Amino acid sequence: MIFIVTILFVLLSGLFSGLNLGLLSLNKNELERKIRLGDENAKKVYPVRKQGNLLLTTLLLGNVAVNAALSIFLADVSSGLVGGLLSTALIVLFGEIIPQSYISRHALRIGASTAWITKIIIFVLYPVAKPIAFALDKILGEELPTIWSKEELKEIIKHHEDHPDSLIDQDEERIIIGALSYSNKEAKDVMTPRTVVYAIEQNETLDQQRLTEIKYRRYTRIPVYSDVMDNVVGIIFAKDLLAVDDQIIARDVMRKDKFIKIKEEQTLDDLLNMFINKRIHLACVYDEFGGFSGVVTLEDVIEEILQEEVYDEGETMVDLRDVALSKGEEVTSDS
């Protein structure tokens, strides 16, 4: 009989201790996400986990009561010193260390299978636990939701991709991280700089030589300016020149409503929305003094998200931003 009662107390102590650590380690926001995804274990655990202070108070009160009862019981059936040492050893090893180590690794599954037991314990100890939990809610407030920064989210994604059981591959990791990072960048960070922008003056006659040059360069959109490059007034679509077999003035074939003017500080997420809403693919970038700095295309923004080069069907695979940077390095080294 003594053995059975001792085992019962130790099991209850381990249950209270393990559930206390395991259930409270489960994030309420994560449980809500799992419920939306149809996780049955999360549905069982959430009702007892959502009131964190009540759950904490109930399990701690139960644990303290069981441990005290075990100590008193063993002290009564044996000498005080032996009972104290035995109860301490049993509580520490089988009532704390082992159950906490095991349940913390399988918190959701065990929490779901013992949810009915937890509900009974909460019901039994409610008159004592509820006032304490209410006081904790008022003094400390309810649990704060876990909110991750973008940098933390990126580290989480990297950690998932590195895990052997991960369902996220390298391409998905790259795209997700790109999507989390691109909004922090500005137009000036991704633009093709003025020094390598191919542009045409609006009054220029596009003869066969110029048309051949445009075809050779394989640009799909060409900025058109008036007098100076700081005054971009439109763009020419290369496809509109396919039917041209004779001389034509640039302004006669340019489109005035197919580009926008933006500042260098324009963020890429805002720029992407502008591209989508206005259904255009090119923006001319201007500095704080109104000077033309370069161009940004929809493809440039998408590249920042995909973290990979995107090319039009006829576009040559040369990154003009890299060309401009290399030229700048050459000038610096020469000086």
Image (cartoon, rainbow, N blue to C red):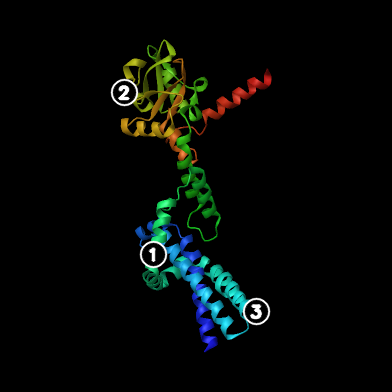
User: Which quarter of the picture shows residue 224?
Assistant: top left
In terms of depth relative to the viewer, which is nearer, 2 or 149?
2
Q: Which residue is mark 2?
A: 257
Task: Give the mark toward the camera: 1 or 3.
Answer: 3
In space, the residues marked 1 and 3 are separated at their CA atoms by 39 Å
Q: Which residue is mark 1?
A: 48
Residue 233, position in %: x, y?
36, 17
In space, the residues marked 1 and 2 are separated at their CA atoms by 59 Å
What kind of element bears circle 2? loop
Residue sticking out furthest to the top: 227
Q: Is residue 265 left or right of residue 236?
A: right
What kind of element bears circle 3? helix
In terms of depth relative to the viewer, which is nearer, 162 or 86?
86
Task: Looking at the image, tell me whether mark 1 or mark 2 is earlier in sequence order.
Answer: 1
Position of residue 22 relative to residue 87, above or below, is above
**Crowding near pointer 1: few (<14 within 10 Å), some, many (20+)?**
some
In terms of depth relative to the viewer, which is nearer, 317 or 28?
28
